[in-house]
Image: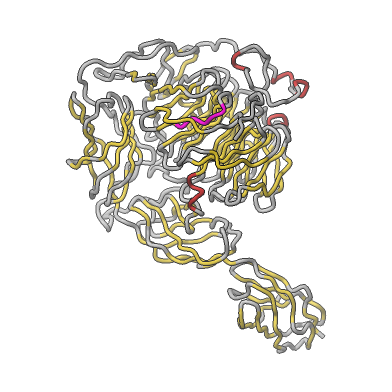
Amino acid sequence: MALNTKTPNMGCGPTWSAGIRRNVGQTCRSDPAREPARRRRSPPRQAPPRCRVTGSASRVPGPAPAPVRPGRALSQSGTSATRAVVPARHRCVTGGHRTGGMPSHAGSVSADLGRWVVPGSSPQPSSRSFSSPPPPRSGRADAPATGSTEERALPALAVATVPVGRLPRGVAVEPVGRRAYIANSGSGSVSVVDTGSLAVTTAVGPVAAPAGVASVPESVSPSVLEALLYVADSGSDTVTVLDRSSYGVIGSIAVGLDPCAVVVGPNGLRAYVSNAGSDTLSVIDTPTNTVTATIPVGRRPSDVAVHPSSFLVYVANQDSDSVSVIDRSTDRVADTINGLSSPIGLAITPDGSTLFVANNGADTVSVIDTAENVVAATVPVGSRPWGVAISPDGHRAFVTNNGDDSVSIIDTDARTVVATPSVGKQPTGVAVNPTGLAVYVANTGSDTASVIQILNSMGPNRGPMSGGTTVTITGTNLASTTRVAFDAVPATLLARTANQLTVVSPPGAGVAQVTVTTPGGTSNPKPFFYYPGADLQALEPVAGPATGANTITLRGDLLDTATRVFFGAIPALPRIVSSEEIQVIAPVAVSAGMIPVSVATAGGTTPSLAYTYVNAPRVSGLSSTSGSMFGGAVIAATGRDLATTSLVTVGERTARFSVVSDTQLAIVIPSAIDTGTVPVSVTTAGGTATAPVGWTYT
């Protein structure tokens, strides 16, 4: 494949004056005359001293912050410099860049995992029958059993720096979280970062000027899609398809001008691409890698977010100060959210209730209620906010501040900034690891990626009794780890850095205490909860439309730790009702027919039950179209997809019927109180259809 040498551009960002490193390559063939004066700003002024009060995690400038407590030194290994950001009360700090790295800790010091902190912590399981069943969780995936602010208090942070290619912009993390992908718009490549070792393992390409990158969600169908990356290439006006396994280019898809962002929908069957140069959104069918729709949106669209369960897609329009809301079922703009200020990045919470939008022109984040499509709150953040990402539990939003080289961490419930760690220069794209313990930031101005690690944590902190769960452990002094044990049983150690370990849990039962051993000793223990397997016993209904969007109730045992419901291989987000019941909105089917439905829980994946996707019915004609108002006539209705018929109405009256075949019904006409023509309608599991000619009572 020939490398397109067109000059890289930055169509999904504001245009600033040339000659300053911050602004290099940040225009997308756009006419400067189009840029409002408020967007052609001078370089940011030095930020005044700021004070983070009451439980916030604040930046620690200078080369050597004080250790958290004796024996907790910070480390630097190889090319990944690491520094800590400690929680502080009434600590005043100043703005400015980090300088220098931290020296390696000398001597043998035991690993320290700190106070137990875990996102989405769960109650203690005991056996197959819980003596005290876990309380129902909210509809949020992996929501904590309790929701107090204190229990969600942000622990200490560490920021590692990984060199990548030139002008990095977009960021994505694969579903299992073992690799992060950084789109290098100035190098024509995508850096692959091993999230365990925090090192670049390879560069994928060539791609002319990659702007955005997206990974296909977990366990989609067909399975071949799982190994694909989609890269928005603003240098060639295409989306490049890359193979995650071989790191080769599979092909390219022509889209609009200056594609900026690409997002793959939750079922993996559609990808959405914002085209900043043509003010459109391209819809790609991923099984065939073809564009199926091109939707006009606002001026200079940048980022895209897909609702996890409804048929809505959100597009940030920088020059229209708006967000377009697109109905996926019609590929049309259904609503427009106005009143924003040069929005660039946006992200939606896992439950789909709230959209966070970075207002690059106002140094704020708008919090939008997706039920009403209105701005519910405004959160002040840093200078020129750019990218937005949400933690898997939905409790934190991470916003890159391109103007002051920082990331604002927002408590999504309190809607306040709780920490502002410094990162590299001019941060743009951002993504969160599925564990919620690491955040990856592309720094366009320093050709690096920052990795913000949430220390003294473990995730996930629960798994099946059979073992096999990939667990991330964070803390300090972990680089020389020799053993990780779940009680006395050793775990398989996959990767280690100064602040992070990746291990695989061994088989176990009940609560295991996890410890880390280094030459300096053994750490304080942390609990890991082993769960027995859940059981899925019933679905209601057992069939539904191939277009999805209907609510299904699943009943069984120990379902309250459910994280996904799989329709075949397509995942959907459940709403927890109780230990015995969950609900889910059915995703769109790949095709009509019977599929297995299973539930992924902390104890593993349940046995499956059958669910049938049904095409919408069609009634093509009636064997007779008129008769006495006293009823009693038996007629035939012909059409297709009629086998699951559950209701036939003639006018407003219910008619008796029998299913002859998938293409024919026998209908007994009910009586009427008056003469005239009324519609004949048929309802099936796939929807409702009306005969082209009605029944006339005489």
Quarter of the picture holding the C terminus = bottom right
Which quadrant of the view contains residue 392? Answer: top left
Q: Residue at x 43, y 26 (%)?
A: 451
Side (left or right) of 520 relative to 680: left
Q: Is residue 56 above or below residue 649?
A: above
Q: Position of residue 97 (x, y in %)?
A: 48, 13
Side (left or right) of 233 relative to 692: left
Identity of the residue furthest to the front in this view:
2
Q: Which one is in front, 288 or 143? A: 288
Give the colour scheme of this rendering.
secondary structure
- The overriding secondary structure of the stretch rendered in magenta is strand
Q: Residue at x 45, y 13 (%)?
A: 98
Q: Position of residue 347 (x, y in %)?
A: 56, 37
Q: Residue at x 35, y 28 (%)?
A: 455
Instruction: Judge whether residue 121 is colored magenta.
Output: no
Q: Is residue 63 above or below residue 544?
A: above
Q: Which one is in front, 531 or 178? A: 178
Q: Position of residue 225 (x, y in %)?
A: 51, 48
Residue 397 visible here: no
Instruction: Judge whether residue 191 is colored magenta.
Output: yes
Side (left or right) of 323 relative to 478: right
Residue 17 visible here: yes
Residue numbers of the magenta segment = 188-192
Q: Is residue 277 above or below residue 76?
A: below
Q: Position of residue 166 (x, y in %)?
A: 54, 22
Q: Is residue 144 above or below residue 684?
A: above
Marks counted in the figure total 0
Quarter of the picture holding the N terminus = top right
Q: Which one is in front, 489 or 115? A: 489
